[in-house]
Image: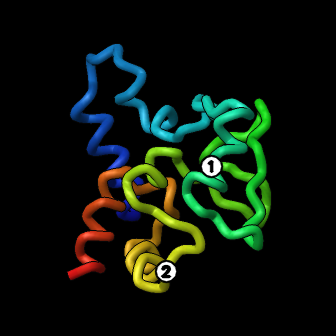
């Protein structure tokens, strides 16, 4: 049994007898979540957060999910931009994300406030 299987089994043991679907690992992914950004807000993102023209932004369609963006793209939260994430990502932030082996969508928006504060110091 590898580490992931062991962890999943541990969680199942802790949640036995509970009817909560959140306790089942198959529901942990964000497959059921879709984008709530509207086209009007989306068009303002580039201007408001000063995203360079060289960075291609695509409006998510109804089938797109944060955990499975189109090939060659990443999903980001509007809140991440509001809390300090900027595009293109500075090498400092890329290194942090790479060290944790996560993409920008996998960290909380508050992470960006903390990371930017650390970078400024």
Q: Which residue is mark 2?
A: 90
Quick check: 32 left or right of 69? left
Residue at the spot 61% in from the left edge and 45% down from the top edge: 66
**Corner quadrant of residue 30:** top right
User: Count the marks: how many?
Assistant: 2
- Could you give the CA–CA distance between mark 1 and mark 2, rounded to whole angstroms? 19 Å
Residue at the spot 66% in from the left edge and 44% down from the top edge: 44
Q: Looking at the picture, how far across and down is residue 25, in whole percent?
A: 44, 38
Instruction: Relative to 18, say whether 45 is above or below.
Output: below
Placement of the N terminus among the 4 image quadrants: bottom left
Q: Which residue is mark 1?
A: 45
- Density class for disc 1 (Cα within 10 Å; few <14, some 14-19, many ≥20) is some
Colouring scheme applied when the structure was drawn:
rainbow
**Quick one: SS at disc 1?**
helix
Comparing labels 1 and 2, the label whose residue is closer to the camera: 1
Placement of the C terminus among the 4 image quadrants: bottom left
Q: Looking at the picture, how far across and down is residue 118, in whole percent?
A: 24, 76
Residue that protrudes farthest toward the front in the picture: 47
Q: Looking at the picture, how far across and down is residue 8, in whole percent?
A: 37, 46
Q: Looking at the picture, how far across and down is residue 9, in whole percent?
A: 34, 44
- Density class for disc 2 (Cα within 10 Å; few <14, some 14-19, many ≥20) is few
Residue at the spot 47% in from the left edge and 66% down from the top edge: 102
Quick check: 55 left or right of 92? right
Residue at the spot 30% in from the left edge and 52% down from the top edge: 110
């Amino acid at each position: 049994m590898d580490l992931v299987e062991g962890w999943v089994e541990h969680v199942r043991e802790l949640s036995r007898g509970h009817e909560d679907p959140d306790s089942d690992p198959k529901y942990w992914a964000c497959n059921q979540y879709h984008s709530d950004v509207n086209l009007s807000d989306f068009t303002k993102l580039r201007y408001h957060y000063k995203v360079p023209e060289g960075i291609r932004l695509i409006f998510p369609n109804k089938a797109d999910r944060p955990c499975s963006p189109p090939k060659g793209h990443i999903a980001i939260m509007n809140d991440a931009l509001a809390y300090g994430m900027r595009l293109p990502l500075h090498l400092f932030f890329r290194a942090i994300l790479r060290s944790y082996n996560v993409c920008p969508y996998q960290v909380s928006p508050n992470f960006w406030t903390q990371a930017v504060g650390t970078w400024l110091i």
